[in-house]
Each structure stands twice: as structure tokens, then as C-alpha cells.
Amino acid sequence: MQLDLKMTNKTPKWTTERLFKALAHVKLGGSTCLYTREKCEELLPKILRIEELKKEKDAVILAHSYVAPDIIQAVSDFVGDSYELSKKAKEASQKTIVFVAVKFMAETAKLLNPKKRVLIPSKINGCSLADSISGSQVVTLRQQYPDYTFVCYINTTAEVKAECDVCVTSSNVYAIIEAIPNNKIYFLPDKLMGKNVINYLAEKGIHKDIKLWDGTCYVHEEYNPEMIQYIRSQHDGVKVLTHPECSEDVLADSDFVGSTSQMLNYVKKTKAPSFFMLTECGLTGRLEAESPDKKFVGTCTMCKYMRSNTLDDIIRVLENADSDDIVEINTKTQAAALMSIEAMFKYNM
Ligand code: 13P
Ligand code: SF4
């Protein structure tokens, strides 16, 4: 069944005052994230133009929680983690999907809803994980490890997904790898996430032979336990939340580990004097806007790929997309890559 996302997410009519009210609490990123009345006044014409274009072009805007707060709060129809976004992309009824995130996520939308025109506003396509391995490298690995089930993180290109058996996201990686009947697993490309899966299974007394590729997320690998110690020494009762792309030492010192949406839900339902979010700070910006009663401490680290999406780029792709802005996947890759994503949905986790 196709869901009309416009019907379920009524966009308010924006004014400078409403925009300021929605964004005034965003502050963790310092001056780059400050939304003054003047800044909101400057952004308003762009936001209103995007509203017009969405109607004119029959477009829906899906955005990841790591993009700029103005995109999240004012123009997107749905914001989520990569699992939720792929489900929304599959259900979208509009002719055009504008995917405000990174290329592999937009490709996943195209795989799941191939008749739609999928546009990607970002001009710097990339992700340090997705860029770390190619489809032909997976072919070589499969020859080396013929008995292994190949599990790819969603942060991979369609070409890589096409060579794997099942795709996973940060919200289901532990549960799916645990459920796979084969004890021999090749997990790629995130070696830190892979090590975290091994530790999780070991704690449950499950021992699988898990081989790992040597990829990392350049944002999450930077966090270390010393940062957590320091923040805990300065902020009594702080809750530390961590994304599973961080190292095992960081996870060991955390109060909660989960996907970006699982982290968001944890904060929304937890009473604590403050929160330290070990992930890209777009998520903190989103929480500051949506839960102004909560206090966030610590650092702000931005993903250059996610942050290369701007309101101007959204206008540009909706007005006049060029071939680089339109996601295309060849038929052979499309069919094979879709199988690995459908295999993930079959686990229903
Ligand atoms: P989530 O699926 O948890 O949103 O993670 C995506 C991502 O790119 C994390 O760096
Ligand atoms: Fe890729 Fe890391 Fe950016 Fe996520 S935060 S999109 S994993 S580079």
C-alpha cells in the first residue's frame, strides 16, 4: 500500500516568527547552528520556495537526522534513521523523492521504489564507510570465503549490496547477525561495528566466526573513552549515548547504544540532568529543537557529506536537476541489490 506522506505530515505555513520558535533552542554547534530572528528572516524565502516546488513537482522530502536543523524542521516531510527512511521511501506515493542525506541512502530509496525520480541535493557524494569497498572487492572476498554469509551495512553502494546476501542497519545489525543460521559471517565494511557485534554475541554466549572489512566512519572513530570520563567528571548524572559505529572502548563506557532514532527515543523518554551524544551533532540539534527541556553537553562533530546538503541545493534539484543529481542504478545491480535489502525486511527486526 502506498502512503501519502504529505497527508500524514502536514507542513505548517512558515513565518519568520514560527521558524525562529522552531529553531531558537538549537545551540550545540556554536555559531554555525545559531538561528537568530535575522537568520530565520533570511531563510524564509527559500523555505517558502521549497514549499511551492514540492507541490508543483509532486515531491516528498526525506531527510536524515544529521542534516542542518533548518532542513529538518522546516522543509522535510519525514526525518529518521537509515532504516526508517528506507521504509518511508518504499511507501512514498509522490512522483519525486528528494533524499537529503548521502548517496547510498538515496540509492536505497531508488532500489525500493524504482519508478520514482530520486534526487540527491548534496554535491559532495560520499561516506567514508561506503567509499571503503567496491563491488569487485566483494566478488574477490566471496571467492576467498565461499561458505560465509555476506552481510553488508546499509552504508554501502548499490554495487556492493548487489554482491551481498543481506543488508543491515544500525538499528537491526545485532539482531539480524544473531538470527542468521550460518555461523560463518563476513560483515562489511565497518570494522568497529563488526567488533561491537562480536562482543554483543559473546556476552550472550554465542560464538560465530565473523570476518571483518577494514572500514570506519571518520566521524565516529574519533570518539574515545577519555572524552566520556571528562564529560562525566564535569556533569553529574549525565547519560552517555553512543552510535554502534564507535569503538568498543567507547561503547563499554556508555549508558546506551543504538541507531540515531533509537538514541533520539531514549533521550525523549529518559529523565536525566544532561545527555552526551556520541554521534554527528545534527541529531543533537534535532533534539534541542524538538525537546527544548533537555540539556545536551559535549562536542559537536559534523559529517561533511551530510552537511553538504543546503536549502539552495534542494531548490536547485527541484527546479532543474542535472544528471548528477538524479539517482540511476543499472537493471542488473538494481535486481541483485534489492534482494539483499528485501532479505533484511524479511527478518522484520
Ligand atoms: P543511522 O541509521 O543510525 O541513522 O546511521 C546512519 C549513519 O550514517 C551513521 O553514521
Ligand atoms: Fe558515512 Fe560517517 Fe557520515 Fe554516517 S557520519 S554518512 S557513516 S561518513
Image (cartoon, rainbow, N blue to C red):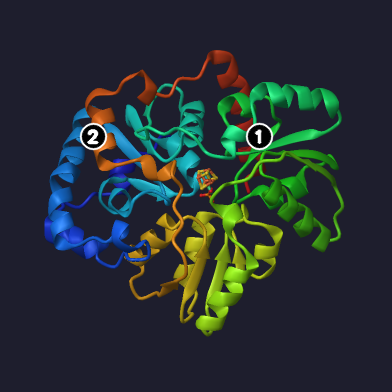
Q: Which labelled disc corresponds to residue 101? A: none
x and y percentages locating residue 331 in the rendered image:
54, 14
x and y percentages locating residue 289 in the rendered image:
32, 64
- Name the one closer to the observer, 35 or 22: 35
Three-letter amino acid code of the residue under disc 2: Ile
Quadrant including the N terminus: top left
Judged left or right of residue 103, residue 136 is right
Q: CA distance from mark 2 to mark 1?
A: 35 Å
Q: Which residue is mark 2?
A: 315
SS label for mark 2 = helix
The total number of labels drawn is 2
Determine which quarter of the picture holds residue 5: top left
Q: Residues within 10 Å of mark 1 (few under 14, many from 20)?
A: some
Task: Name the residue: 65% across, 24% down.
Answer: 135
Vertical arrangement, residue 239 with respect to residue 258, above or below: below
Q: Residue furthest bottom?
A: 236
Q: Is mark 1 within 8 Å of ligand 1?
A: no
x and y percentages locating residue 270 in the rendered image:
50, 75
Which one is closest to the eye, mark 2 or mark 1? 2
Q: Which residue is mark 1?
A: 343
